[in-house]
Amino acid sequence: MRLPVLVAVAALAGTALIPPALVQPAGAAPAEGTSAAPTGDRPAAAPVDGPIIQMFQWPWESVGRECTEFLGPRGFGAVQVSPPQEHVVLPDQGHPWWQDYQPVSYQLESRRGDRAQFAAMVDTCNAAGVEVYVDAVVNHMTGSGSVGSGPGSGGSEFEKYAYPGIYQDGDFHGCRRDIADYTDKWEVRNCELVGLADLKTGSGYVRDTLVAYLNDLVGLGVSGFRVDGVKHMPPEDVGAIFGAVRDVPGTGARPYVFQEVIADGTTSAAEYAGNGDVTEFAYHGRVSEAFKNGTLAQLGFLDQQMTLPGEQAVVFIDNHDTQRSTPTLTYKDGAAYDLAIAFELAHPYGTPQLISSFAFDDTDAGPPAAADGTTLPADCGDPAWVCEHRRPMIAGMAGFHVAAGDAPITNWWDNGGGQLAFGRGEVGHIAFNREGGELTRTFRTSLPAGTYCDVLSGEPTDGGCSGGTVEIAADGTFTATIAPNSGVAVHVGAQVT
């Protein structure tokens, strides 16, 4: 969660919480009043093979349908869904997107659907081979900007610092003011982020309550969590909470955890790497700037320009925060954005995270909604829903990412400017032209000879290609003319002959 610049965003991030008595499965979480702590030497969970896609503000039924109809068949590995817990409702502010990040209780009652709809979505996505990761806000509850706005989306009454049956005044830190000095680590972790009631995450009761909520989600089939606002909590608190969450039923696997850490001179991403993967914010700045300005050659040593090893990093071109606060590249930038996403899916550094979002001009605007604020079904034929993942250059690259696996970079070439090509071992090759004129060149690959679908121009079909084709010769070369602001990508999973 990024620090907002307007008081209106003083409701930004949230947590999803429910009293332990309501959700605690037998043997799943410590008893109330004990300290939730890691259960010994438990192996870290690995991310899925396919990319993660943040279905930002999509309602549950729409997510389930998209898993079955589009995401699963194309190799997307997981969906990151918006916080599912009961949240504040702010009609006087137009039901902004950030109201969902102010938890009221841990009931699964949000503007995107109820508990039954959420559970059905998880089952549907899992059946389609797409895991579900929940955006979990465990740092705070509601904010000063939502005082007097009750009840919440599930009908619960509340006051700041008083959530009946869940938390009372003593469950929050004593620093009841906004963070003023971001160079003071104690203040960053104990004072309030834009007026949000800061939970005492070192407390055994608070930890137990959070673990019970997370266990409830895992019990419904959720496979992992994106943890919001992590730098506002001590690493040991995050580790204790997520280390105590139960294994995913039926798999024996640990839930996958990746943590949102906006690193700065006071807080490093590496401080949290022992708890799970961490978002590498340096990535989106470096790669987005390169594709925006056509300076692709600088990406040759990308891993050396990052703060985390690739196996610990989750990377993105944009997310719901950067779309609004630091919009280097977003869906509004057309081909430059699409090519940057293609690079993210082709390059081996980090676990790629994409976004599928809704259109906006007002940075506070919520998703398409009915008069009562309930989110309308997502419809990729409606311009109100952007559906970035369905853009041709992006849709075909999920398969490239899966095919490439952990294959190394090979056959790197660049012209010192905005033209770039590289391979992924013997399984894939991609070329970019971010300059104003055509690029005609013979490219050397390590691919076997044959005819391949160019997955940047169209997805493979049964026995053919919906876009262009590329002929790889016996010596592994191919010749192509690439139009400005375009590219060519081939991989062994899209070989026709």
Image: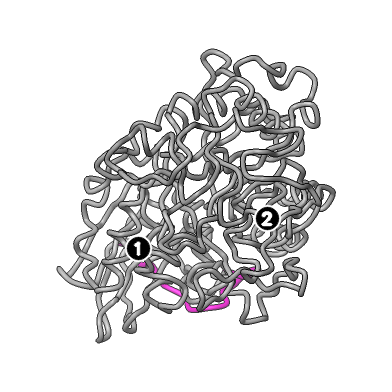
Tell whether 381 sits left or right of 280.
right
Relative to residue 415, is residue 468 depicted above or below? below
Q: Is residue 46 visible?
A: yes
| Residue 73 or residue 318, whichever sits in front | 318
Tell whether 105 sits left or right of 207.
right
Based on the displayed image, in which of its 4 quarters is residue 263 positioned?
A: top left
Based on the displayed image, in which of its 4 quarters is residue 100 positioned?
A: bottom right
Mark 1 in CB contact with mark 2 (< 8 angstroms): no
Secondary structure of the residue carrying tag 1 is loop
| Residue 472 or residue 157, whichever sits in front | 157
- For the record, the magenta segment spans 460-475
Q: Position of residue 458 (x, y in %)?
A: 53, 75
- At 72% from the left and 49% from the top, the residue drawn is 86
| Residue where numbered disc 1 is placed | 474
Q: Position of residue 35 (x, y in %)?
A: 60, 16
Disc 1 marks which amino acid? Ala
Q: Position of residue 296 (x, y in %)?
A: 24, 66
| Residue where numbered disc 2 is placed | 148
Based on the displayed image, in which of its 4 quarters is residue 20 positioned?
A: top right
Q: Which mark is residue 77?
A: none
Camera-side mark, 1 or 2 = 2
**First in sequence: mark 1 vs mark 2:** 2
Disc 2 marks which amino acid? Gly
- At 70% from the left and 29% from the top, the residue drawn is 212
Tell whether 99 sits left or right of 362.
right
